[in-house]
Image (tube, grey):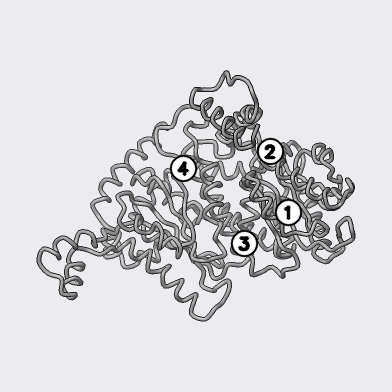
Amino acid sequence: MKGYKKQLWQLLEQQACQLREQSIIQLFEQNPERFQQFSLELPGMLMDFSKNLLTEAVLQQLIQLAELSEVEQWREKMFSGERINLTENRPVLHTALRNRSDRPVIVDGQNVMELVNHQLAKIGHFSEQVRNGGWRGFSGERITDVVCIGIGGSDLGPRMVTDALHSYADKKLRVHFVSNVDGREIADVLRVLDANKVLFVVSSKTFRTAETMTNAETARNWLMAAAFDQRAVSHHFLAVTANADAAVKFGIAPENIFDMWDWVGGRFSLWSAIGLPIALYIGFDRFEQLLEGAYEMDCHFRDAPLRENAPVLLALVGIWNSNFLGAQSQVVLPYDRSLAHFAAYLQQAEMESNGKNVHRDGEAVGYQTGPIIWGQLGIDGQHAFYQYLHQGSNIVPADFIGSVTASTPVAGHHENLMANFFAQSQALMCGVDYQSVAQELGQQGIQGEQLDQLIPHKVHHGNRPSNSLLMDQLDPRTLGALIALYEHKLFVQGVIWEICSFDQWGVELGKKLASRIQPQLGADGGLDGFDPSTGGLIRYFNRVSAGINGS
């Protein structure tokens, strides 16, 4: 970090020291228009960031930080197809997958929109064939179940979206997901299925991902045990991959292979053929609505001024809380059962993107990049970890996500849910002071030494920041916009931190070591080349395994 940007960073550090002496409540008292000033209304969604220890002066400096970091220039590079994935020399074009304007996006002299639109048409045609019973299994039975085999972005995206849009499915197909290489997961899924009526979608860019291919081979063996005919594979397996040759070798018919491209990262790929399970489950028309919602957020991100730009504002608030106020994690709290997998989805998207410790030029960074992202459904969390959020020694900024309209209306339930949504963000900000606790306990007849001992345990200091994202309703279009909002948020943060957000070398190292270790499991012989701890663990595994298996 150089020049004026470094000076501005230091000025923001000074501002943070001064603001720590104030409270969010005081900021509201000083500015009656604070909610209007620090909230943003978008189509179908309200974003409120007023419950942060943030002033307009600080926000303007953060916007200046974004300008000095050339966020707008990097944004244009991404949308236009420049190779901003520097370490892999690739464009980053998940936005092209949902480009509903059909504006040309040129990479190496080719308009990639031609490829995108061809695959979309193929997804639409195939998904409707299966849903309407025109595409059948080897024995002529109609498909009733789809098993999606993938891992990481190839699993989390479709899994999260199909669960989120469960109320929009017509139940023509049941969709199951297998990602874990632990045999229990695939065994549990296959045990209840009819091999004549199941369709497998194997999603792997390389078609060599160890976990995915292990599960795919198990599924193929299961199918063959029922069909007794190799030709059944071509009737019951699809591939989403960039390695068509490997998919054909596996037994998948060329016409049943859907394309992936190296300019789409796995964690941003649900908009592509990776999203085929979504189209199968809710129908292609609703899959297109998902794309349209994301495209609307893309247009907002590309066109809105920085001060009125939702992804930019969300990114800047996050940077303020983590880099200047010292928060080390960010909790995501959906108050909608349909978003049960959303925190896990964001965990991968943000931590795989921005969990980096070097700048683009390879020099070590001198500040925190990418806070820990965690969370779960808000109501469940209230009876699990909210104690930590309210009274823990570390302050954890929170994103509350809810909707005005219930995904599944049941009398009285949604009002109860949303009362908790509003109450928890208020409680984190306001807390309960010494005098209020003393008065409440006094009214209960508690006095003297008992009162003095109990008060500290019941005081909540408050002043804990949060954002609230309130959707009109959770539908395909709004969900698309919500996902794109967070995609662009992490992009902006990566630009400001000057890191490479679109590679994931930390994922590759463990995979390489695992491929070297696996042949040693259950094998005789030495374990040269392993550190003493790893070697000792492998020897123990082999010894106990041999004893259990009687060898």
User: Hey, what amino acid is under mark 2?
Assistant: Thr
Depth check, mark 2 against mark 4: the one in front is 2
| Depicted 76 relative to depicted 164: above or below | above
Q: Residues within 10 Å of mark 2 (few under 14, many from 20)?
A: some
**Numbered badge on residue 226:** none
Determine whether the residue tagged by mark 3 lies in a helix, strand or loop.
Answer: helix
Q: Residue furthest bottom?
A: 411
Q: Residues within 10 Å of mark 1 (few under 14, many from 20)?
A: some
Mark 1 or mark 3, earlier in chain: 1
Mark 1 or mark 4, earlier in chain: 1
Mark 3 or mark 2, earlier in chain: 3
Q: Is residue 363 visible?
A: yes
Q: Residue furthest front?
A: 550
Determine whether the residue tagged by mark 1 lies in a helix, strand or loop.
Answer: loop
Would you name the residue on which mark 4 appears?
370
Would you name the residue on which mark 3 appears?
163
Would you name the residue on which mark 2 appears?
209
Residue at 38% across, 59% down: 386
Residue at 63% across, 27% down: 520
Depth check, mark 1 against mark 4: the one in front is 4
Mark 2 or mark 1, earlier in chain: 1
Determine whether the residue tagged by mark 4 lies in a helix, strand or loop.
Answer: loop
Mark 2 or mark 4, earlier in chain: 2
Depth check, mark 4 against mark 3: the one in front is 3
Residue 128 rendering spot, x and y as whole percentages: 81, 63
Residue 282 rendering spot, x and y as whole percentages: 71, 65
Q: Residue furthest left?
A: 448
